[in-house]
């Protein structure tokens, strides 16, 4: 088992390196650089050169590449050109916000998606199954940003029962009791969470339904039923455990989708997370910040895949030895 | 089938395609064909009354190519729709002698069994018809200012209301369909082509070639697609038609990994089969083995992938346009209209709502079509 985990970890390192190289090449190939955005066009060339020198932009690409790799390896993320402060500090502020949003969503996706999928599979072709199938198809085809705006319109503007921007109430959060502060946070996460999670929940429900349906047809389920076990025991103990296997991979693969969606949702609901950060960094050609954001995303996704691989190996011992 | 009901079928099928299907209980095809007919008739009545305005002569300043394309499209779609009605009314006599169903016929027969697939097919056909016939359906020029009151809610004259520049939202949404759908189609064709060749090469050669190529797919898969797209489009700013080209290329270049994996696994199992071994024994050149023998046999899942990917590509393109990095302003796409409407969400919800509904409708129809195709083409995956 340990050898298996080690092998997976070792395989993940070149992937992160590849992502960084790819991003670096992308930035190098693009026309223009950050100075186009921050330096007054009328700046005399001598001053511009000094500025370039300050940010190390005067050196050839390969020197900067080696330097960047060395710095990242030692945990030095460099300084943001747009915000003029260490990239590490910026990411330290933004990352927890995105992680909170996506981990809450991941839990919701798992519970809602799996429950609905199992319900559908157990009552295949019933009215409930058909209604949920149509519903999941509908929500699966819905753009997050539009759903976010519609939720905002209905719950934030028309009914006015939920806040539509920020993580906490900007005026009264600090004066609230502890319980009130938690309640404030919960109220603020509802709309972004729903907007981001609905499509993936629908997708998970679809996969779960087919996975359970496949398992239910197996012989060992018939054996369990023939032994006279209760239906609920057969479903939960015998069917569900085996049906969960493919879902582990699906959920891990949904991490990139969650991060993509979080860009849109964070911008709409004014959450100062990673998504909004990288969007601003890209618009400003703030190259150190963009590189660091891609680095963080790659690491998060690689970790998610790693966790999925390990869970898979725990659940299915055959994997470890293949 | 008795004589009288055959003649009834003949009449209904020719007067209104789909009515015959409907009367004999084939509800989905009946409703689908009738919806197509309604679109055709509406475009005909509405468009042909303005034909002199729409069809300016080449060389004059008001000349545009779209109405001519739409006119051709109208006749083509009309011929196809009425042909379906006619074929139903007067079924072709069974061919004499021993005949086997072609593969396409077998797939079609399977596909027709899938209810959601058929609904999806007709929804896609209606959307494509609307997109082609837009110049004949749209009541106003989508970019014309001051055609109605400012920020007016939906009325009989302006079905989807108007925006702050007093433009007609219905016309803008219709023209947006053309851009969104064509980007979706072209980008997916590009992605499927890249993915098929990539996967086939990796699977066929195996060994280190395979390992390195699959590492590349994993690499791109471990980045959030929308963020990668934002970075590329954001760094390589382009103007006008160039930016449309850039977006299509980039959507294609970031969407091929799924199909590469599928094709690779297909090729891996095909490679061991006798007919591929035979091509080696015959000494056929590699490109011939790949393109003539392997890829055509691995193509069924690619078609399924493509129809599902069109929906996804429309979603991603809409998200890019929503973030202001899509097709630039004078052209309206669904995503950019939603973005325009964001500011007016409180006062004018209709600007945001209708383009979004169009996205949902079209993505859903492509997904349903894809599900149906998968059931028909790949029995192993049925019900997934």
Image (cartoon, coloured by chain):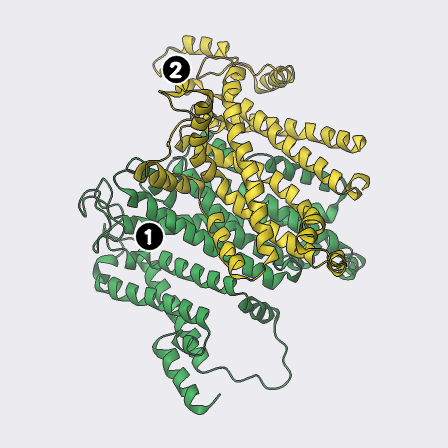
Residue B374, percent from left and from top = 59, 59
- Viewport quadrant of the N terminus of chain A: top right
Q: Nearer the viewer, residue A305 or B316?
A: A305
Q: Does residue B142 appear in the picture of this structure?
A: yes
Q: Which mark is residue A39?
A: 2
Residue B268 lies, with reference to residue B92, above or below; the image says: above
Question: Pointer 1: what residue?
Answer: B174
Q: Residue at x 72, y 56 (%)?
A: A229
Q: Nearer the viewer, mark 2 or mark 1?
A: 1
Say which colour chain A has.
yellow
Give me the chain that's green: B
- Side of A19 where B32 appears, left or right: left
Residue B221 lies, with reference to residue B64, above or below; the image says: above
- Side of B202 where B113 appears, left or right: left
- Side of B171 where B197 appears, left or right: right
Residue A154 lies, with reference to residue B384, above or below; the image says: above
Q: Which mark is residue B201?
A: none
The image quadrant of residue A82 is: top left
Q: Nearer the viewer, residue B374 or B22?
A: B22
Q: Kindly identify which chain the residue marked by label 2 belongs to.
A: A
User: Label 2: few (<14), some or many (≥20) within 10 Å?
Assistant: few
Q: Kindly identify which chain the residue marked by label 1 belongs to.
A: B
Q: Residue at x 37, y 10 (%)?
A: A44
The image quadrant of residue B138 is: bottom left
Q: Residue at x 61, y 35 (%)?
A: B222
């Amino acid at each position: 088992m340990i050898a298996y985990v080690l092998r997976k970890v070792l395989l993940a390192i070149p992937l992160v390196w590849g992502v960084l190289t790819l991003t670096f090449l992308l930035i190098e190939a693009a026309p223009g650089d950050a100075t186009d955005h921050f330096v007054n066009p009328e700046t005399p060339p001598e001053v511009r050169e000094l500025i370039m020198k300050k940010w190390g932009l005067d050196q050839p690409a390969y020197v900067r590449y080696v330097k960047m790799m060395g710095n990242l390896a030692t945990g030095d993320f460099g300084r943001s050109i747009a915000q003029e402060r260490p990239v590490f500090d910026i990411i330290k502020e933004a990352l927890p916000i995105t992680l909170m949003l996506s981990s809450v969503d991941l839990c919701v996706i798992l519970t809602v998606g799996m429950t609905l999928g199992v319900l559908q599979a157990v009552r295949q072709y019933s009215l409930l199954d058909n209604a949920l199938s149509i519903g999941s198809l509908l929500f699966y085809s819905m753009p997050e940003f539009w759903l976010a705006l519609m939720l905002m319109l209905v719950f934030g503007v028309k009914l006015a029962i939920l806040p539509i921007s920020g993580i906490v109430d900007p005026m009264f959060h600090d004066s609230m009791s502890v319980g009130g502060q938690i309640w404030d946070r919960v109220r603020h996460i509802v709309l972004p969470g729903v907007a981001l999670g609905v499509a993936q929940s629908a997708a998970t429900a679809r996969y779960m339904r087919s996975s359970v349906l496949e398992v239910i047809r197996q012989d060992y389920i018939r054996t369990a039923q023939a032994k006279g076990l209760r239906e609920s025991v057969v479903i939960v103990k015998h069917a569900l455990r085996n049906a969960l296997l493919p879902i582990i991979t699906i959920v891990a693969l949904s991490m990139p989708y969650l991060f993509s969606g979080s860009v849109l949702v964070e911008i709409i609901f004014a959450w100062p997370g990673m998504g909004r950060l990288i969007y601003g960094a890209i618009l400003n050609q703030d190259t150190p910040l963009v590189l660091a954001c891609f680095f963080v995303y790659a690491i998060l996704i690689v970790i998610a895949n790693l966790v999925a691989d390990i869970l898979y190996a725990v659940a299915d011992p055959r994997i470890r030895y293949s | 089938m008795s004589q009288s009901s055959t003649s009834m079928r003949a009449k209904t099928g020719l007067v209104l395609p789909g009515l015959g299907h409907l009367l004999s209980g084939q509800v989905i095809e009946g409703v689908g064909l009738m919806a197509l007919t309604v679109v055709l008739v509406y475009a005909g009545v509405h468009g042909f009354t303005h034909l002199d305005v729409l069809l300016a002569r080449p060389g004059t300043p008001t000349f545009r190519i779209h109405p001519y394309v739409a006119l051709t499209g109208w006749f083509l779609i009309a011929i196809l729709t009425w042909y379906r009605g006619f074929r139903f009314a007067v079924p072709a006599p069974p061919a004499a002698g021993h005949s086997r169903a072609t593969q396409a016929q077998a797939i079609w027969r399977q596909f027709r069994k899938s209810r959601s697939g058929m609904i999806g097919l007709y929804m896609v056909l209606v959307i494509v018809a609307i997109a082609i016939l837009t110049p004949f359906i749209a009541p106003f020029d989508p970019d014309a200012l001051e055609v109605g009151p400012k920020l007016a809610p939906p009325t009989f004259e302006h079905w989807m209301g108007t925006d702050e520049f007093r433009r007609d939202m219905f016309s803008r949404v219709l023209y947006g369909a053309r851009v969104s759908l064509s980007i979706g189609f072209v980008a997916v064709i590009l992605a499927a082509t890249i993915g098929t060749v990539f996967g086939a090469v990796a699977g066929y050669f195996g060994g280190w070639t395979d390992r390195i190529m699959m590492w590349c797919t994993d690499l791109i898969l471990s980045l959030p697609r929308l963020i990668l797209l934002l970075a590329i489009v954001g760094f390589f700013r382009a103007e006008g038609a160039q930016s449309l080209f850039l977006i299509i290329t980039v959507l294609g270049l970031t969407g091929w990994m799924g199909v590469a994996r599928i094709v690779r696994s297909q090729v891996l199992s095909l490679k061991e089969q006798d007919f591929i071994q035979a091509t080696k024994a015959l000494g056929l050149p590699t490109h011939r083995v790949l393109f003539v023998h392997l890829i055509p046999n691995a193509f069924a899942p690619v078609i399924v992938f493509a129809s599902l990917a069109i929906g996804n590509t429309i979603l991603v393109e809409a998200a890019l346009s929503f973030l202001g990095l899509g097709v630039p302003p004078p052209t309206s796409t669904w995503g950019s209209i939603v973005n325009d409407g964001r500011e007016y969400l409180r006062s004018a919800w209709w600007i945001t709502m209708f383009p979004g509904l169009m996205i949902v409708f079209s993505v859903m129809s492509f997904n349903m079509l894809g599900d149906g195709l998968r059931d028909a083409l790949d029995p192993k995956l049925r019900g997934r």
